[in-house]
Amino acid sequence: MSWCFTLTPTPPYAFDLTVHRFARFKDEIVDRVIPHQYQRLLSVDGKLALATVTDEGKPQRPSLRVELQGKGKVDLDRPEFATQLRHILCTDLNLKPFYRLTRKDDLLGTIAPHFHGLKLVQSPTVFETLVMAVLSQQVNLTFAYSIKKELVEAFGEAWQVNGEVHYAFPHLTVSPNRKKQTCCDFV
């Protein structure tokens, strides 16, 4: 089962520049990039959906077509899936104030036009952000992403779609049997 909808990012929005960060590392298995498309296995209340985002616009008139494929009984039109994608792909950030500032700066004024519409991707959860911050400390990013891959393969949910295995980043649960909630486990 699948469901499609459109995201309209705040312009300018350069999809290829924005998702390029994920394409830099061969061990990136959560956030996948193929030409003009981005894929991620999303989870809402433990229900998985594979999101495939396709760029159908231009930086000044951005348009992203999203196809969600559900695993099992999942309500694909839940707004939380779109909210996660808007957050991950940073579609709502208005860059116009930033560009006004760069025009006044000799260095940034020459660099910013080369990256017009680039937005900073984000992790969908605080937990994933913290894990990646710890993994990236004092090591090169290639090594950090290889550790992330091992972590995701060991503790994340996997789903095979069209012959390819997609992984969801592990989520955090707190053991309900503890009096103090100090010990956390990957699920």
Image: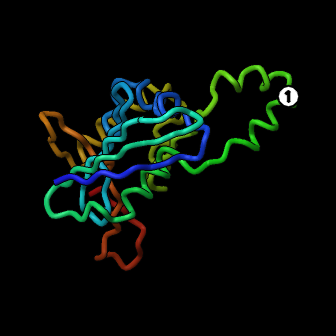
Placement of the N terminus among the 4 image quadrants:
bottom left
Please tell me which residue is depicted at 37% across the width and 37% down the height of the picture. 54
Can residue 147 be seen in this snapshot? no
Q: Vertically, is 24 above or below 76?
A: above
Q: Vertically, is 184 above or below 8?
A: below
Q: Nearer the viewer, residue 82 or 23?
A: 82
Can residue 158 be seen in this snapshot? yes
Q: Position of residue 108 (x, y in %)?
A: 77, 26
Q: Residue furthest bottom?
A: 179
**Left or right for 26, reference 158:** right
Please tell me which residue is depicted at 36% across the width and 62% down the height of the picture. 184
Q: Nearer the viewer, residue 55 or 141?
A: 55
Please tell me which residue is depicted at 46% across the width and 42% down the height of the picture. 63
Q: Position of residue 47 (x, y in %)?
A: 24, 61
- Mark 1 — residue? 105
Residue type pointed to by label 1: Asp
Question: For mark 1, does the 10 Å Cα neighbourhood hold few (<14), some (14 to 19), or many (20 or more) residues?
Answer: few
Q: Vertically, is 52 above or below 114?
A: below
**Left or right for 35, reference 76:** right
Please tell me which residue is depicted at 34% across the width and 23% down the height of the picture. 26
Q: Position of residue 49 (x, y in %)?
A: 25, 53
